Amino acid sequence: MDVPFINSGALSRAHYSLVRKVESAQSPQAADQILLSEIDGIRHHLTIGGVSLKECREKLIMLLYCSMNLTRVNPGELAFALPHAVNLAEMGQTLRDKQLAFVFCTEVMPPNHELQLMLVNTIRKDLESSSTPRICLALSVLIQAPNDDVVPAVQSHLQALFMHKSISVRRRAYLAYHSLLRNDPSRLTPLEDAVVLRIQRTLPSVDSCAMAAAIKLNRTESINDEVNALLPIVWQRLGHQSQSLALLVLRALRKAKLSVPNIGIALDIIKHTSDPPVRVLLREAFLVLSSVSAEAIQECQMQRSLSPVACIRRLLTSKDPNNQYLFISCLDCLSPTLWAGTLPGTTAILDEWEVQEVIKLLDSHDRLVRKTTLRVLQAVDPSLVEAYSTQLLHNLPIGLTLSAKSEYVSRLLDVGELQYENDGEQYAIYLKDLFAVAEGDTQGRTEDMSVLEVGVEMILTHIREFDVTSRISCVTALAVSATELDVRIGPTLMVIISALVCEYCGKIATSPLALLQGMASRLVSYGDAQEAAVTVQDACLLSMLRMSAECNEIPQTISKLVAEISQFSGKRIRNRCNLFLTYCGQRNVLTSVIAQAPSSSLPDFLGALIMYQSDATGASTPVHFKSPSAISGPSPGSPSRANLSPGKLRYEAYAAPQAVPSLRHILSPHRNERMGSRTRSSSRASEISLAELSRTITPGELTIVAAQGPIQDLSEPDHVQNPNAPPSEDLASRVDLISLDATFSEVPVTVLTPEPDFEEVWDAMETSNFRGWCESSMDNIVRLLQSLQHSMRVIAVDQPPFEGELKVLVVVPSDSSLVEPTRYAALRLRESEEESCLWRLRCDDIELRTTIKRLLEDI
C-alpha cells in the first residue's frame, strides 16, 4: 500500500497500519500470522469491555477484513464479536452503523445461533420504524438471509408494508415475503392477493413493484390470469406509444403461459415495434411467443395474415451487428415450422437469398451470433451443421497465427458442443478428430506448437456441464489416448487430458498405473524451452503425482525418467520434478492432500499440495502452476523471495586474508572521464571489517563500490607500485574486494551526496505510477539501468524500505547551465522463480520515464 493515510480511506491509523503490514508480508503464512495476531488483539480488546459504538464499528470492519484475507481461518471463529455486532445493530444511531452490523451478522452468524432471536427483534423494530431507509435496510436483510425463525415475528408487518406509500418499501416487502415463504406456497396467498389488488388499482398504469412480484409468482394461476388480462388493456388503451408499460407486462409473462387470445396482441406488438429503437420490446415479444405451441401461433398467423418473421426480415440485410443479432435471436425463439416450410402444406417465409444471408452469419466476428445461427440451422436441418463442421475440419489452413488458429478451433468446438450436447463419448471422439487435424502432422512438430488456451477453457467448461455419466464416459475416452503410445497427442489436448485425469482419477475405468506410464513416456516429446512445452510438462507432472495416490507402487523407470528430465529442464519444471520425486511414493501424504483440497480439480490439488509443503517445512514454497486460464483457476499466492540467491548474483568475495588491522581508504577519489569534470565524492570510503570482506556482496553494495570509479581505475596496490615499500604501509591495497565475472568498468555511476531517501522520493511521485512484468532477472535489470549513464543507488532486498524488493533510485542531476531541478526515477523489483520479475516505476519526468519503460519492456 503506497497510498498516504489521508487518501487511503482507512478508518484509523490502526486500520491503515494493518493493511500496510498485510500487503507488505513476504508470504501468505506471514500475512496470516499478522491477521491472526490482529484478531487476537481485537478479541482481547472487546473482552475488556467499555467499547464505544465508534470503536465497535472500526473493530468489526477490521475483523471482516481479516476474515476475507485469511487462508486458513474460517469466519465461525469470529463469533466472539457477534454480541457487539448485534448491539450495534440495535443501538446504532446512523444507517451506516446498522448496515455494518447487519452485514457482519449475515457473514458470521450461523443459522441457529443463540443471538439470532435478538437480531430478529431488532429487524422487527426497524420494520415498525417511520424511517423509510431503516425499513428498506431491514427488508434487504430479510431478502439476503431468509430465516424460518423470523417469519412469525415479521409476517404481519410485511403484509402491512404491501400498501406502503414508498415504491422502494413495497418492492422490498414483496420480495422479502416471497424469499421467506417460497418454500411453503400455501402461505403465499396474501402476497398473491396483494399483487392482484395492486395491479387492479393501478390500471391503466403499471406498478413495477407488483410486476416484479408477479414475475416471481408467475406459476400461480391467479397472477397469470391477471397479467394476461393486463396485456390487452395496456396495449389497446395506450397504443404502441407506451412500450415501457407493455415491456413490464411482457417480462411478467415471459415464464408464464401466454393465453391464446394474447398471441394476436404479441404479433401486433412485433408488427409495430420492428424498428431498431425498440429492440428490447421486440425481443421480449418473441420470448413470450417461445412459450406458446407452434400450432397456436400458426393458426393466429393464418387468421391475421401476419408472420412475425416477415416483420423482422429487413433486419437481416442490415450492416449493424446489433440488428443482425436481434434478427437471429428472434428467429431462434420460433419453431422452424413457422418460417422454414419444413412441414407439408407450409410455405417458407424467407426467400432463397435470405436463407443464404442467414448462413453467412456463420462467419460473423461475433461468437454469440455464430452460436445462435448454428442453433437455428440445427433446428431446421441437422445435416446443415454437420456439413459446415466437415467443411471447417477438412479445410483447416496451415501456418495460421496463434490467435487465428484459436479462433478457427473455437468455431469447431462450438459446433461440437451443439451436436453432442450431452453425449460424452461422442464428444470425446469429436475432440480427438478435431485435434488430430489441428495438431496433426500437417501442422508441424508437436514441440513447436502452442497451447490453445481458448480451446482448453471451452472444453473443460463444456464437459463440466454434462451429467455425471456422460462426464465419466467422456473423460475415459480421452484418457485412453494417453495410454496408446502410437497415437499423437498435441499440447492442447494433452493439457486437457492432464486436467481431466487429475480431476476424475479413481472414477474412470482406465488403470491409473497405465495412465501414469503413458503420460510419463510422453513427457520427453514436450521437452523444449518454449513456454507451451513447459506448460504441458507442468500439467502432466502434477496429474502424474495425483495418479500416484491411486497406485500401490511406482515403477523405478518412471522415477528415473522424471529425474532425467529434471536435469535438462528449466527451474519451473525442475521444481515440479522434485515435487513428484518427493511425494510420488508417499500415498498417505497424497491422500491427506487430496482430502484437504477444496475440489478434485488440478489447481485445487496443487494448492493443497503447496499448503502441505509449506506446513511441513515451516516456510513458503513459491511454486507456480502457469497454465491456460481454464485450468489455472484461483491458485494460492506465492510471494517472491525475500532475498536474492547469492549464487544467482555471482558476486563472490575472495578468501578472507590473514588478520590485519582495519582497512581504511580502500578506494581513492578520482575523476570520471565519461561524466565530464564532476568530481566523485569519497565519503563512502569507510572502515570495513574482515568479516564484511568475506561475505557475499549485495547488488546495493556493489553499486556503491562501482560508484567510486571504474574498476580498472582503482589505485594500484602499493606493493605493486613500490615493491620495496615497508610493511607498515596501509594494508588496504593488499586485499581485492570482489571478483566479478562481468565488470562494471564501462558503467560509471556517481555517488549521491547527500543521498535522497528512497521512500520519500517514492511517496512524492504517487501520481505517476507504472508497473509491468519483465522476463529477466533483477541483476540483469540493474546492469541495463547502469547503461543509461545516470547516477544510481541500489538498496538490497533485505534493507528497508519495502523489504523483499530490490530498490533502485535513478538520479539525473540538474545542469548548472539550466534551471531544471534534479530528476528522479524510483524502481521497485520483486523477483519470481522463473528468471523474471515484477517491476513498479514512479517517475514524474516524461523523458526519463519513457526511457526506462522502453528499456524494461524491450527485455
Image: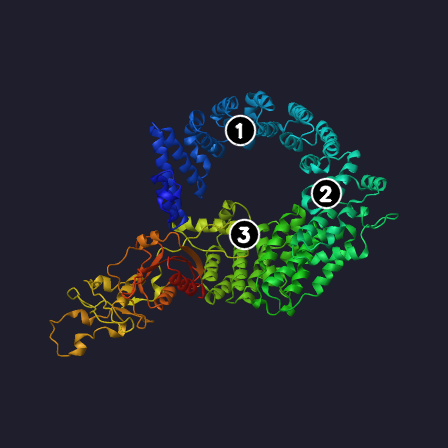
- CB contact under 8 Å: marks 1 and 3: no
The mark found on residue 273 in the picture is 2
Q: Nearer the viewer, mark 1 or mark 3?
A: 1
The amino acid marked with disc number 1 is Cys
Q: Disc 3 or 2, which lies upstream in sequence?
A: 2
The amino acid marked with disc number 2 is Thr
Under tag 1, what secondary structure?
helix
- In the rendered image, residue 445, in percent from the top left (x then y), is placed at 59, 69
Q: Is residue 487 left or right of residue 150?
A: right
Which colouring convention does the figure follow? rainbow
Work out whether residue 813 can be spotted: no
Q: Is residue 246 left or right of residue 264?
A: left
- In the rendered image, residue 164, in percent from the top left (x then y), is placed at 58, 24
User: Which image quarter holds the C terminus?
Assistant: bottom left
The mark found on residue 602 in the picture is 3
Q: Disc 1 or 3, which lies upstream in sequence?
A: 1
What's the distance in space between the residues labelled 1 and 3, CA to CA? 44 Å
Q: Nearer the viewer, mark 3 or mark 2?
A: 2
Outermost residue, right side = 345
Under tag 2, what secondary structure?
loop
The amino acid marked with disc number 3 is Leu
Residue tagged 1 = 136
